[in-house]
Structure formats: structure tokens, C-alpha cells
Amino acid sequence: MATLCRPSVSVPEHVITMEETLELARSRHADHPQLPLALRLIENTGVLTRHIVQPIEETLKHPGFEERNKVYQTEAKARVPAVIQRALDDAELLTKDIDVIIYVSCTGFMMPSLTAWLINEMGFDSTTRQIPIAQLGCAAGGAAINRAHDFCSAYPDANVLIVACEFCSLCYQPTDLGVGSLLSNGLFGDGIAAAVVRGRGGEGIELVRNGSYLIPKTEEWIMYDVRATGFHFLLDKRVPGTMEPLAPALQDLAGQHGWDASDLDFYIIHAGGPRILDDLSKFLQVDPHAFRFSRATLTEYGNIASAVVLDALRRMFDEGGAQHRARGLLAGFGPGITAEMALGHWHSPHEGTA
């Protein structure tokens, strides 16, 4: 059975606090008619610190999409290999053992994908398959786990490397003054994560079932407006309420496996914002403490897009994991509105075989 091993996570060295974010909003948008609302929404995110790939003075500039994309490429190449190496070490594998690299990112663009550079730079075999995913936003972390599971189901001896690289700060647009944009300026952070899904062996979440669900007619609720100045993030005010229709989809997936989504041992959930976690707790009838890993990611790093689910899982590992055979749910949410969901058992190889 395919096992999602311990993720490796790295965030940039430049930090911005909530207090600094609020002060920037006050100073740069003093005449904004909805500034009090925006400030209140930012405070309600609970995001105390975020890490960004450039100093804030550089982040606030807009030298153009071309220059920003160059920064994305340079920083990805400088930072991703070390994160991958730690993930390989944790999975007790070498580059030659990897059959597929799934690379997810929605904050920069490269063609060929960074996967080609990684294969050449880090010594992966030339036959390594490449699966770049660029347009699923925050849901891409869950999608990467599910596509890795699918591949290992088809090829049981295969090993898949997942890489998520998100520099959300490179999408800051100083001319976007809607309340949703101002909120986003205080919500998103930068981060890199990597994890291995082993076809055989390993400690972590033994994946048993996955699924996807798209809420009909919501494709404009989270989207990019792509202009000469780059990616302009659009966030509809209805997005925080999407857990009401998505909770039944999680229940349905669990029910297909004979499980009750309201009665599992652990939950690794994309932390898009505090209301997402609060509502999911309500509609699934799950103790809010069950989402502590996701909430910690949100508080300390902000919404790091596709890397959130991997960081939340890393925090679960840091806490000691779970009992052998404990049942759990992973879910990522993003544009579409799309949910990418997975079920799995905690597998500890030292406590027996699945």
C-alpha cells in the first residue's frame, strides 16, 4: 500500500507580523472607505506571522511580471533542492528510487517545469516521469497526494516525490484595492514543502481511498485575472461559506469506505482561513482540537497555498504521529471550488504490517 511519508517544509527568512501588516494597510490605504472592515478581517485571520521570499520593501514594489517571474525561478532553484533532500532522507530513499516527480505551484511559471531542472541538477534518473500541476491553487497539495496514490496503485513498487513551491508574496498587486485583495495581503505567505509517497514501506499515512468534488458554478469564486502585470488574485466573499456544501462530500468519501468522517482519529485539512476550519468542525461535528495542525500552520505561516496540507502533516509527525492503524482524512480546497480528499491509516512499520 502507498504510504505518505514525513514531509519536509521550509519557509523563507523574511518575516512580517500581523501588527506590521495592519500598519502597512493603515499607512498605504488611509483613505480607503472600507479600511476598517479590511483591518478587522485581517485581524480575524489569526495569522500572527508570515514568511516572505524578499524583504517587505522589495515585496511592496512591482517591477513587472517578467522580473517577478525571474525571482520565482531563481528562488525556487535556490531553495527547493534542500527541502527535497530532507524528504528523501526521511523516506529513506535516494534520487534513483524516485519514479515520478509531481510539482505543484500557482505563484510562478516555468516551461520546462522545475521538474526538468531538478532531474538534471539533483541526479534523478532520466526516465523519471514529470507531472507539473499549475492551476489548482491551494487544492493542488491534496491533488498531488491523490495523483501519487493513483500512480502507486497502478505501479505498486513505485515511489513518488511531491514538491509544493509557493511564493504568494510575488503575486502582491499594489493597485488591487478590493476588500478581498486587502484581506489576501494579510493572509497568504510563502513556503516550500516536499514529501515522498512510497509504494512499499515507510512510516506515515497509508493511503486507502481518494476523491474529488467540485461545487457547481463556483469557478469564478477563486481565480486569477491574468494581466500584463501578472496574476491578480480574485476572492469572492462567498468562499468562506463553502464548507457547508463540501462537508457532505467528505462524508460521502468516508462512507464509501465504511468510515464516518465525523469519527476519525486525525484530520489534515487545508487552512484557507479560520472560518474554513470553524465551519468544517461544525458541519462534520468534529472537535475543533482535531484541526490543531492546520490552525498552527495558519497562525505561524499564513495560508501557504498548496503547501498547507504537507505542513499540517509535518506538524502531526512532530507531535509523534498517531497510533498504528489510526484512521484519518486529508483534504485540500481551492479554485473550482474544488476539494481533493484522501483517506488513510497511520502506518508504523515497527508495530506490524498493514
Image (tube, rainbow, N blue to C red):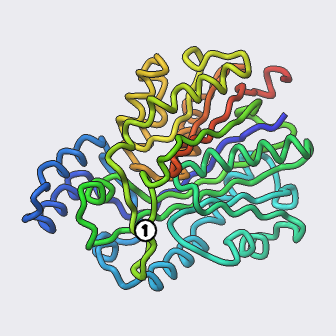
Query: Quick one: label 1, few (<14), some, or many (20+) residues within 10 Å?
Result: few
Q: Nearer the viewer, residue 242 or 302?
A: 242
Q: Quadrant of residue 156?
A: top right
Q: Is residue 59 above or below residue 136?
A: below
Q: Quadrant of residue 128?
A: bottom right
- Locate the N terminus by quadrant: top right
The answer to whether residue 341 is above or below residue 106 is above
Lateral position of residue 322 relative to residue 301, left or right: right
At 81% from the left and 70% from the top, the residue drawn is 123
Q: How many marks?
A: 1
Tell me the residue that label 1 is attached to.
Answer: 225
- 2 relative to 331 in the view: left or right: right
Task: Residue 160 in the image: state x and y as whole percent.
Answer: 79, 51
Please tell me which residue is depicted at 86% across the width and 40% down the height of the picture: 153
Above or below residue 309? Residue 80 is below
In this view of the protein, which residue sits in the foreground, 217 or 208?
A: 217
